[in-house]
Image (cartoon, rainbow, N blue to C red):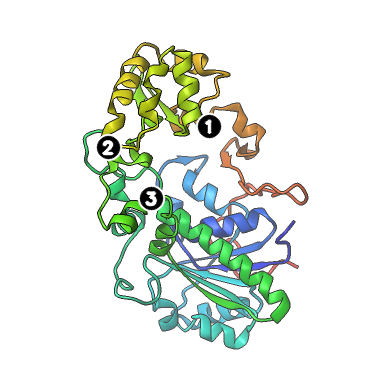
Amino acid sequence: MKLEGVKVLDLSLFLPGPMLSVMMADHGADVIKIEPAGEGEPTRHIGYEKNGASVWFRNTHRGKRSMQLNLKSEEGQAVFWALAKDADVVLEAFRPGVVDRLGVGYEAVRAVNPGVVYCSISAFGQDGPHRDRPAHDVAVQAMAGVISLNEGQDGKPAMPHMPVADAFASLTALSGVLMALLRRQQTGLGDYLDVSMFDSVLAWTPNVTGKIFATGEPHVPKDERSWGGNAMFNLYETRDGQWVVLGGSELKFAQNLLKAWDRLDLVDYAALPPGPGQEPLRAFFREKFREKTRAEWEQWFDGLDVCFAPVRNLKETFEDPALAQHGMLAWGADGSEIVGAPIRFLAEPAQIDPELPAINANAGEGWRS
């Protein structure tokens, strides 16, 4: 597999770091998860459980090994350094400054292992005015201005559906780690990555910052293309109280749909800029979609060249046979569901190890040979 022989020492907790290291484990990396003393990784005990393990922990820590270390003790320090001297990657997500106070920061590790790729994930980065501000995903999203864009039907901001700050930081960090490992092949030297959840969210706003940069004015979400201002890029309620989405604002899709309904007289509205000018078309769609149930609309749209989709709940999605066929849903020997690996290589594909490490199960071990 692509990462066979890569040794990862993961001190991170919760979601961004563990997701990074589980993706590396799926592709052959040897990941040792360093858990704090006591109850260990918090997600062992958070949320719903099945077959004796939390679903969250199962899908972020399968295929890893577990050691509990007290980095404030001489014994814990000795074990850490025995591992760090041979590690390819060290991953941490403490608050800025913590690893240096513990004596296990980048400079200390680099002194004994110049080739190490050391990655720190934090809410706002290792420097700057927000550095010491405590925050998890939702607070970072709020500070980054994206929760204000997540406006509900009542015009008020809603809680975000996905932890995008966690997710973007994890993927940003994974990309940086792999770049640094690639560069190390030429130089023999590792590097230090300062990955900010806040920065990672802002990096994904090029398609929605137009009004701010062009006019200096904030968005009115309901009038913008991405959040409801475009009739062909919007949510509509069906007769049975379900919802569907039109998700392609290109004029050709509006022409295809309105032709099928014999309402090409409305197509000019679709050509207008997003906002109030398109309201007659949005009003028509609202009325039209209430004529059938969601299931009936799914059947009606089948084969029509229009970006249409039912608004499914997550249970419905995981019941879709396409997930198992595509490898995004698998099962362990005990029947526990496993979310698959999204990076699909033709050669050396991911190999998911469904085994979960018991807490501190690998105490005293070194790297696999």
**Residue at the image point whose x is 32% and y is 52% from the top:** 211
Residue 87 at x, y = what percent? 64, 74
| Nearer-N-terminus badge (3/1) | 3
**Residue at the image point whose x is 54% and y is 47% from the top:** 59
Q: Which residue is mark 1?
A: 318
Going by the image, does 184 lie left or right of 96?
right
Marks 3/2 in contact by CB < 8 Å: the verdict is no
Q: Which amino acid is tagged 3?
A: Val
| Nearer-N-terminus badge (3/2) | 2
Does residue 207 show up?
A: yes
Q: Which residue is mark 2?
A: 152
Going by the image, does 37 lie left or right of 24?
left
Tag nearer the camera, 3 or 1 = 3
Q: Which residue is mark 3?
A: 208
Relative height, residue 79 to residue 339 (above, below): below
Residue 254 at x, y = what percent? 45, 25
Residue 256 at x, y = what percent? 50, 21
